[in-house]
Image (cartoon, grey):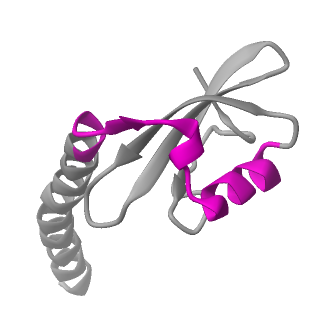
Amino acid sequence: MTSILKSLLMALLLAVSLPMVSMAEEAEKAAEKAAEKIELTALPAPVKDGFAKEVPGGVITSAKKLGGEKVRYQLQYKLDGKEHQITLGEDGARTRKKKDDKGDEAK
């Protein structure tokens, strides 16, 4: 009886949490769509410094300022002749990393 109750409780928790994850992903996608392209000279110093630490040798080719709960910067860059992208917070810290990501987000 206890295992049935536990299973029902887990199913209920899962059913409640899945829509919340989906809503958060949708909010992030909406913020990315509302991105504002900015000049590289307008990037805050912490973002430039964070990029230099995260991607030594990388060259930023374009930048977007993302809205949402927290301001983030989506940077397109070249490294070893390949195009990549990374998202950093206002403090220069990386804001997300894909599960299969080994370092940078290749495009």
Q: Which segment is the magenta one?
A: 31-55
**Quick one: which residue is furthest to the front in this view?**
41
Q: Is residue 72 above or below residue 85?
A: below
* Residue at 49 percent of width and 36 percent of height: 39
* Residue at 81 percent of width and 55 percent of height: 53
- On whether residue 59 falls in the magenta region, the answer is no
Q: Is residue 15 above or below residue 107?
A: below
Answer with left or right where residue 59 lies relative to residue 45.
right
Q: Is residue 93 visible?
A: no
**Quick one: which residue is furthest to the top in this view?**
81
Say which quadrant the C terminus sits in. top right
Total numbered badges shown on the rendered structure: 0
Answer with left or right where residue 32 lies relative to residue 80.
left
* Residue at 22 percent of width and 86 percent of height: 2
Q: Main secondary structure of the magenta part?
A: helix
Q: Nearer the viewer, residue 94 or 19?
A: 94
Q: Nearer the viewer, residue 14 or 39?
A: 39
Q: Is residue 34 visible?
A: yes
Residue 34 is situated, as x and y percent measured from the top left of the image, at: 22, 39
Q: Nearer the viewer, residue 25 or 49?
A: 49
Answer with left or right where residue 29 lies relative to residue 66.
left
Quadrant of the image occupied by residue 30: top left
Residue 3 is situated, as x and y percent measured from the top left of the image, at: 26, 79
* Residue at 17 percent of width and 65 percent of height: 11
Say which quadrant the N terminus sits in. bottom left
Q: Nearer the viewer, residue 8 or 24?
A: 24
Residue 40 is situated, as x and y percent measured from the top left of the image, at: 57, 38
